[in-house]
Image (tube, grey):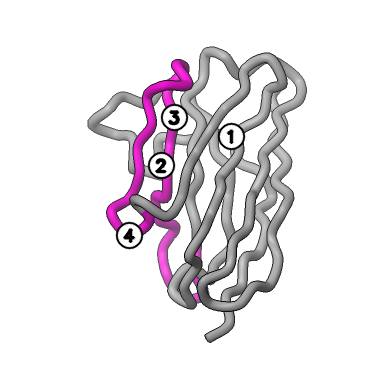
Amino acid sequence: QMILAESGGGLVETGGSLTLSCAATGRPFTGYTMAWFRQAPGKEREFVAATFRSATNLYYADSVKGRFTISRINDNNTVALQMRDLKPDDTAVYYCGASARVFSSTLTDSGRYYIWGQGTQVSVSS
């Protein structure tokens, strides 16, 4: 069974940068789509970015495109989310998710992911 663990969250000022990391243990994640979602208080979990099994296929929510970069290193079973030019609206708990049952049409659907980490808090002050 795969276990995901996020790290790297924290408090930054508007315009600052953070890099989140998600480490997978238990089994290789080469056959899985890996994604980042986030959930702010009182809101539903929303898609941020994802990468299919190929590290070259990258997808982003419009709200983070150009500011966030997702990357995966299959040899290390890790996926990272580099975030720059952070805004107060980016404040949320960020979750790493994995699924072997995601297609391009369902990439942004959190219900398609069945392995989740515990989340890491990102707070951006104005």
- Give me the residue at 31% from left, 24% from top: 103
Find residue 124 and report its horizontal and vertical position in percent. 57, 75
Q: Secondary structure at mark 3?
A: strand
Q: Is residue 3 left or right of residue 72?
A: right
Q: Which residue is mark 3?
A: 51
Q: Secondary structure at mark 1?
A: strand
Q: CA distance from mark 3 to mark 4?
A: 17 Å
Q: Which residues are magenta?
A: 39-64
Q: Which residue is mark 1?
A: 115
Q: CA distance from mark 2 to mark 1?
A: 10 Å
Which residue type carries mark 4?
Answer: Ser
- Dividing the picture into quarters, in which one does residue 63 lie? bottom left
Mark 2 in CB contact with mark 1 (< 8 angstroms): no
* In front: label 2 or label 3: 3
**Mark before the other along the chain sequence, 2 or 4:** 4
Q: Which residue is mark 4?
A: 63
* In front: label 2 or label 4: 4
Find residue 83 and report its horizontal and vertical position in percent. 53, 54
Q: Main secondary structure of the magenta part?
A: loop
Q: CA distance from mark 2 to mark 4?
A: 20 Å
Q: Which residue is mark 2?
A: 111
Q: CA distance from mark 2 to mark 3?
A: 17 Å
